[in-house]
Image (cartoon, rainbow, N blue to C red):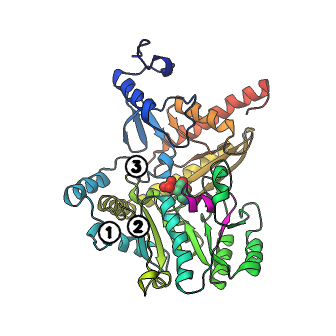
Amino acid sequence: MNDADSPLGAIVGARAYSADEQSLLLLDQAHAWHPYTQHQGMALPLPIARADGAWLYESNGRPVLDAISSWWVTTHGHCRPEIAAAIAEQARTLDHVMFAGFTHEPAAELAAALVSRLPRGLARVFFSDNGSTAVEVAIKMSLQAFANRGTPRRLIAALDHAYHGDTFGAMAASGRGVFTTPFESLFFEVARLPDPSEGDTLAALDALIDARGTELAAVIVEPLLLGAGGMRVWDERSLQGIRTRTRAADVHLIADEVLTGFGRTGPMWACDRADVAPDLMCLSKGLTGGFLPLGATAATERIFDAFLGERTKTFFHGHSYTANPIACAAARAALTLHDDESDDARVMLEVAQAHHLEALRGHPGVRATRQLGTVAAVELEGTSGYLSEVGRALSAFALQEGVLLRPLGNVVYVLPPYCIGTDALAQAHDVIARFLDGERADHDGAGDVD
Ligand SMILES: Cc1ncc(COP(=O)(O)O)c(C=O)c1O
């Protein structure tokens, strides 16, 4: 039902909306401000009423395949009853208590459960709210650990094309682009190292340590997979080389596993693929299985020790919701699911992704394909970069076909919940292939695809 006389009539376009959907959209359009969204001329957001497994359902019942785990958070599938039950139970028992001066079972047990699975040496867990705050905490811990020891250092090194979040410290560490341009004059100094997939990171790090090693507090990396920078896969040898060099120079290695953690790249952590143990590790996204926002920064006992002593050495950082019991209960339930079931599903997903990429590889619209574990990416011909129009066109086409894809510029990726079935995965790749076939036809007849 789409009443042309309704106040929404001017903006609803072709899709038919029920009266309830229209009220929702009216409220949204009048009051909500969406992330990464140019509101002028924006398409209406899709009203989603419920979700199950790998599927989202529009309020009119139409299923939409969540091929990107809703920004990479949903690991075991949407609305997993085990996680929902843990949340409900915790909400009835202890909703929240501040975490300074108090503790509770969900947080203490989660910290212990994480430590038992983390790379060797990571022994302390600091909770925060999301991936960006997990990164902020790691950077601040590194800088303050040096300051507390009486040997202050202030330089951070990070990779080109990195993405570590949208808060100021995380932005400073991220690669430069449209996300960061308005703020760059305010960033602290970050030394940039080439992305190992396109440059000699280790030589650059050697040169940096030679020139400024005693100023360098930490090197931060997204281990083996630069996610938002275009799903760029890099090699284990470089990660090992960064670890060797940082350890020798007494520089912290911060592994931002916000995307790569919880099995995305195969093993529990991308660092495990290279048998690398960082000094600090940032977690979020899959931590609660995709149910609730929660961040965690894991640190070695040595870093923790640097904060012991006078009160001025305290880590003066916290959030109102630090270690929220309900979020911690969700994370515990998600970890249990991890232990119980997802290995086979992940291995099957990895194999199936390789098979689908193989089929796309020779397509004339495809420049390159990449895979790491359960993550498959296809770099399309056309203009590179986040603002590339080809990605937007593909995203719109896919949504019309009932598949949620959100390319990073000209890089489309499939990063689904682990429970996605064979047919649904094939559907996601088929949409990409059909788009490319159409694109080629357009391209052959009408010039540039962008
Ligand atoms: C590697 C990495 N670090 C940090 C973040 C920031 O996480 P959040 O969006 O939860 O702040 C992201 C988000 O995509 C990420 O991919």
Q: Secondary structure beneath disc 3? A: loop
Answer yes or no: disc 1 within 8 Å of ligand 1.
no
Q: Is mark 2 within 8 Å of ligand 1?
A: no
Q: Amino acid at mark 2?
A: Gly
Front position in the image: 358 or 382: 382
- Residue 113 image position (x, y, % from top left): 37, 71
Residues at marks 2 and 3, CA–CA distance in whole angstroms: 30 Å
Query: In 3D space, how far apart are the residues under numbered discs 1 and 3 (Cα atoms)?
Result: 30 Å
Location of the N terminus (image quadrant): top left
Q: Callout 2 environment at 10 Å: few (<14), some (14 to 19), or many (20+)?
A: some
**What's the residue type where badge 1 is placed?**
Phe
Foreground label between 2 and 3:
2
Q: Is residue 72 above or below residue 64?
A: below
Relative to residue 214, is residue 295 drawn left or right?
left
The mark found on residue 318 in the picture is: 2
Residue situated furthest top in the rendering: 5
Does residue 264 appear to the left or right of 207 in the view shown?
left
User: Quadrant where the C terminus lies?
Assistant: top right
The residue carrying mark 1 is 99
Q: Earlier in the sequence, mark 2 or mark 3?
A: 3
Residue 129 image-quadrant placement = bottom left
| In this rendering, the label closer to the viewer, 1 or 3 | 1
Residue at 28% x, 72% y is: 103
Q: Which residue is mark 3?
A: 77
Circle 2 SS class? loop
Foreground pick, 181 / 323: 181
Q: Earlier in the sequence, mark 1 or mark 2?
A: 1
First reached walking from the N terminus: tag 1 or tag 3: 3
Q: Which residues are magenta?
A: 155-174
Contact? badges 1 and 2 (CB < 8 Å): yes
